[in-house]
Amino acid sequence: MLERILKYASLALVLATCAAAPATPANGLDQLIRPPITGKVYPGISVAVGNSTGLLAAGAYGRANIAASIAMTSRTPMRVASVSKTITAAAILMLDQAGAISIDKPVSTYVPQFTSNGAKITIRQLLAHISGIPGRGHGDPILHGDGPVTQTEFFTKLNATPLYATPGTQWDYSNENYYLLAQIVQNVGHASFASWLKQHIFVPAGMTQTYSDEGASDPTLALGYVHRLPQDPFLACAPPDWSGELGAGGVISTPSDLVRFDIALFNGTLLDVAHRKEMVAPAFPLPGGASMALGWFVTPNGVVFHEGDFTIAAAINAVFPDGTYVAEASNGAGLGPDFDRGYFARQVQNLYGAPPIALGKPNPPSLLSMIGPFSTCAQLDAMLFGK
């Protein structure tokens, strides 16, 4: 899992999305999806675009399984990592809309297991990553690495970990916030988080290829790969075990299904007007003029998005001011240079949206300074997690 080291790459994407210099996109979706594969950034890539009328186009290129020479298709399920957080945020706002919870009440109201600081933090602060619970910027002391975590282990660590700041005063991207939000859904919804999402979001939105990663075998799921440089071979590494952390990054989906989620979210199937506005309203300022909303990043030019990264997967879901929805996912992580998913999403919007948004310049963040050369998955794990 690269989530621990992607703080600066995430901010780079926010800043790149804010850029205003115009440019001309490639002609056709096919021409956009080929370069990251022919350039050996990823083994496979999948993309979809839509608007309020429905899915407009979907395409895929490359391999879902290199050894077996299985092609990536638009129906290939893929890990979407932290893009899952937008779905978790929607679930919480749906419960608020139904009157089952209030996002301005303390977390301990619905999660009594959070005994140390649960009465000091509101659900809204969890959604916006301003809870004071230490995350990426403070070494990930609670959820660290890519191994499974039990509920007992999580709350034991959480209750023994002090807040790094008074809730509401500072921002730190924390998977712990979204673990707690999933726990709220389970406690209030009286169902497992996975089954609640399926019944209340996936089925109503028509997301037929989407499910929660509870560890079940799926022969159609894209295998994940990692490499450091384009000339390095793709290594097939084991996926992270997020079966205990579904709220933060445990959704498996397709870009087409993510666009269907966007459509259902913004057309009123899932949330009313008031809750949709509240979800994307800036909640806390970030560097470069962007803001954190409730489960989404918001840029000054009105783009609402979230990206996701594991060692073996990367994704983005972007909502543009003209009502164009773009989702992209890959089954690999290229460390140097990475792929500018925000720029790619803007290119797709330029093909299908009206008016086209300013492209800016691609700003692919490189993580080479953080990760040294490696030739095995075990070596990479040792660098990331001290294993």
Image: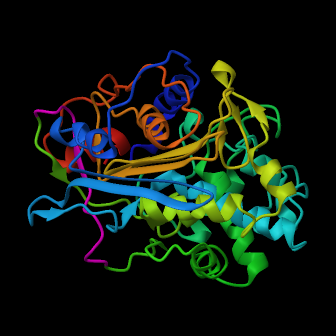
The answer to whether residue 246 is above or below residue 123 is: below
The answer to whether residue 279 is above or below residue 288 is: below
What residue is rendered at 51% in x and 24% in y?
16
Q: Is residue 268 left or right of residue 248?
A: right
The answer to whether residue 90 is above or below residue 341 is: below
Most common secondary structure along the magenta stretch: loop
Residue range in magenta is 218-231
User: Residue extending furthest top?
Assistant: 21
Q: Is residue 281 left or right of residue 322?
A: right
Q: Position of residue 246 (x, y in %)?
A: 54, 66
The answer to whether residue 223 is above or below residue 142 is: below
Depth check: 333 or 375 in front?
A: 333
What residue is rendered at 86% in x and 67% in y?
97
What residue is rendered at 72% in x and 36% in y?
164
Instruction: Tell me if I can see residue 250 in this picture.
Output: no
Q: Please check the rendered image and state whether residue 296 is part of the magenta-colored stretch, yes or no.
A: no
Q: Position of residue 94 (x, y in %)?
A: 78, 68
Q: Position of residue 185 (x, y in %)?
A: 72, 72
Depth check: 150 or 212 in front?
A: 212
Q: Quadrant of residue 162?
A: top right
